[in-house]
Amino acid sequence: MEKLKMHSPNLTQDNIARIRDLFPGCVTEAKGEDGSVKLAVDFDQLRQELADSIVEGPQERYHLNWPGKREALLTANTPIAKTLRPCRDESVDFDITKNLFIEGDNLDALKLLQETYLGKVKLIYIDPPYNTGRDFIYDDDYSADVEGYQLASGQVNETGGKLVANTEANGRYHSDWLSMIYARLRLARNLLKDDGVIFMSIDDNEVDNLRKVASEVFGDENFVAQVIWQKVFSPKNSARWFSEDHDYVLVYAKNGDSWSPNLLPQTDDMIARYKNPDNDPRGVWQSDNLTARNRYDAGLYSVKCPSGRVIEGPPKGSYWRVSEANFKKLDVDNRIWWGADGDNMPRLKRFLTEVKQGKTPQTLWFYKEVGHTQDAKKTLLKYVQFEETENVLNSVKPVELLQRILQLATSPSSDDIVLDFFSGSATTAHAVIKQNAEDGGNRRFVAVQIAEPLPTPEPAMASIFEMGLKRVRNVAMELRQQSSTSQQDLGFRVLKIESSNMADVYYSPDALDNAKFDLFVDNIKPDRTPEDLLFQVMLDWGVDLALPIDKQSIQDKEVFFVEGNVLAACFDASGSIDEAFVKELAKHQPLRVVFRDAGYKNSAVKINVEQIFKLLSPATEVKCI
């Protein structure tokens, strides 16, 4: 019987099979022998993608390359033997919710989610550390002292002699940050649906680097926009040079041919611009310019106003947008506005009933529309009470900003999954709940946050992760009070990244001699529960971690059923699983079933399990741990 591997997938092997789709960063531009610029494969980069160790190549240096890039790629592709342990005590509506809070390093989380959420996430939003020297806590062993950086980047030789004049003393910080974000974006891309999209908040410190890295990971052709968000409502008079009034939001599609933004809701101000001064039976309208700057030879002709005045043509340097024949058709249909006196330059009437039912998104987002940092802090303070002022995060984003992103990238009519793997104070989770409440949507969130301690300990919470939980609990409580009959999902499952449930012997039984092997009566760590095992099996099998779980008793043995018959699991270790029990379980016809090695009554039962299922439930996949 096949055993579950119980560790994250080895992405290097997956990459080999999907090289054309997965590695846009391996395609670059190079001059051919004739001097023309052509697309070419970066074989050094491709070799590194397919290697299980660091490949020697051209000297890494901070440009598009940086010291540690190959190590970051290797780290992203290396499987880990970790798991997600459920924590019912910290969860809300554990058995029925589809929302997830994951505590732990997001690099580990992204690896663990590769099987379960591969190609299933509609929207990713991240607000990564801005690398200001104060907010960068993720360390994947890429950091180096100045001497180590200079040696790796070729600035000094092995004896310490300088090879270049500029020591780039600050370069290692960029390199650390680049390695951190590069590994995570590579894994995150795999999770996006083909029509998925990622929005990334960033400031001036790393916006250039983030855009270069994102273009390598997602492909230049999938760059959508670099949005400017006005984050403050008044200038900072204490600024050294300029008052920094904005941050950026970079937007990349998984596949630019498959993704397009939703239109934003029309505002009252937009609708108020439509009038009906001529009592047109088609309703209110707004006039639009009929001239354009782009050359259009058919757009040079004279027109006659209703007043009788002849306009010899459009203003110099411009052209009518339509041909003369189409202009006459529009005029006959009363779609040309000549002004109240019939003597003005013609304009096109656009009726409210005929325009797009929404507003095309723009790249300037003003605080009056999507909030500012002070709004964000006020919202956080409304739902989380702090005893220490310094624990209020300075980088928190307004809920309105995230709602704008949700409106553009998700649909209320589908169960879109929204992932934020730098969750922080859980603004994204808050926004998902709030937007669902406003438009009746069924969006789901997956929020990942490392257990970063608060600057000063608080009695009610010890980490930023706990802060986010408290915030979302209180938001949900408020919504329940506002509508006691609402069926909205206001809960969340808390899962925590920990070492694998399996003892070391599970992964390397050959490393133990027979004498020592006999000492192991079980290959599962003694402190792990059956529900712990269930979630690691769900991860390994790629089963949605938010599916409902039902516990039943069959012949006095505890059996988990996930979403009915998606998965059945019995982790009984008493050695009493016999053929009668297996036959009873097979009647449920699960798609997958898993047993614990220590549960079988004898080796004969273990051998016969697969045969029993082939006879009674042939579609069932049978495995053990």
Image (spheres, helix red, strand yellow):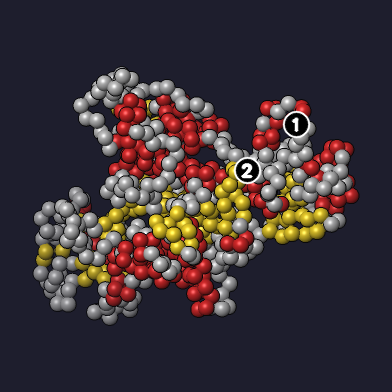
Label 1, label 2: how far apart the Cα atoms are? 19 Å
Labels 1 and 2 touching (C-beta < 8 A): no
Please determine whether, in this image, residue 308 is positioned above or below residue 415.
below
Asked whether the viewer can see residue 260, the reply is no
Label 2: element kind: loop
Foreground residue, 208 or 283?
A: 208
Horizontal placement of 540 versus 203: left or right? right
Q: Residues within 10 Å of mark 1 (few under 14, many from 20)?
A: few
Q: Name the residue rendered at 14%, 59% in the picture.
A: 314
Label 1: element kind: helix
Determine the image quadrant of residue 23: top left
| Residue 152, image x, y percentages | 35, 27
| Amino acid identity at mark 1 | Phe
Give the residue number, with chain letter if any, for mark 1. 517
Horizontal placement of 170 versus 177: left or right? left
Q: Name the residue rendered at 62%, 55% in the picture.
A: 86
Give the residue number, with chain letter if any, for mark 2. 500
| Residue 166, image x, y percentages | 22, 30
Horizontal placement of 465 versus 342: left or right? right
